[in-house]
Amino acid sequence: MVEHSLPFGSVLAESGMPAVDDCWNRIGVRGDRSCPKLEEHIHCRNCPVHAAAAISLLDRYALSGEGEETLASRSVEAAVEEGRPHLIFRLGEEWLGLSTRALAEVAPACVVHSLPHQRSPALLGVANVRGTLVACISLGELLGLDSRTAARDDARIVPRMLILAATGGPIISPVDEVDGIHELDEKAVVAASNQSHAANDRYTRGVMQWRQRSIRLLDQDALLDAATRSLA
């Protein structure tokens, strides 16, 4: 399986957002441990400075979207281009496809730290990705999917994190399973308007049958726009 599509660091650089003071990498648990606050808080994640950095991170997403045209208001091409690579992944019982252009990386599962006064139901908190704080959202909540899933007794099924290449900066989201990156044939895609009401929403480009699975193809622009706005 392909582990990543684009370097995570390049997405951070392209976002143009000022860096958060990552003292945990310099004098905290990931640095030389010289921070005087460690004796009191034991771990950086328990420190108010870390929490303040997380809040600052979310504020930057809000500021980055001010005055910008919303992606949902633009005319979005619904057809999937022939041979366009998509990441196929599962949330609950539903399989979805997302263009690799919307991805920075597929990463191992990691701990997500919740925040006080969550800004939206989709916001799970923040995660530390190689020393960098990244906002974490629930794609299932955003898409209105049933998060309940039957237990699957298969050691090969490993939960992953998708790092989305959003305009305001990378956003991470947990998924239940990743199949891999595959090229999808546009001839097999049925427009969302021809599907049931559940699939006919602004996040869906179409539905197709692929390897005995029904794959719901996501509209990358609408999804990334909604993901960023869920943090504002």
Image (spheres, rainbow, N blue to C red):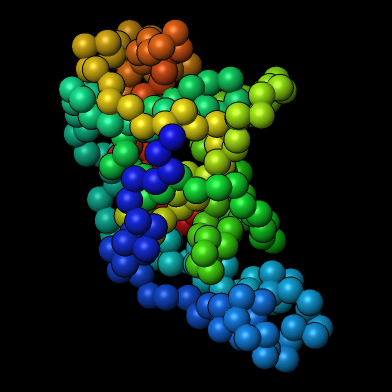
Which quarter of the picture shows residue 42?
bottom right
Q: Which residue is drawn at 52% across and 64% down?
A: 130
Which quarter of the picture shows residue 202?
top left
* Residue 138 appears in the figure: no
Q: In this view, does 27 lie to the left or right of 7?
A: right
For the residue pair 56 and 173, the one nearer the viewer reads as 173
Asked if residue 100 is positioned above or below residue 7 in the image, the reply reads above
Measuring from the top left, give residue 101's x and y in whole percent: 28, 42
Measuring from the top left, give residue 146's x and y in whole percent: 62, 25
For the residue pair 207 and 163, the one nearer the viewer reads as 163
Measuring from the top left, give residue 29's x and y in whole percent: 66, 77
Measuring from the top left, give residue 150's x and y in whole percent: 70, 20
Say how many tags the image has. Answer: 0
Q: Which residue is drawn at 44% across and 49% down?
A: 163
- On the rendered image, what quadrant is the N terminus found in? top left
Q: Residue at x 53, y 69 (%)?
A: 131
Hey, which residue is sitting farthest right in the picture? 40
Q: Residue at x 52, y 27 (%)?
A: 90
* Residue 175 appears in the figure: yes
For the residue pair 24 and 227, the one nearer the viewer reads as 24
For the residue pair 5 and 97, the one nearer the viewer reads as 5
Which quarter of the picture shows residue 224?
top left
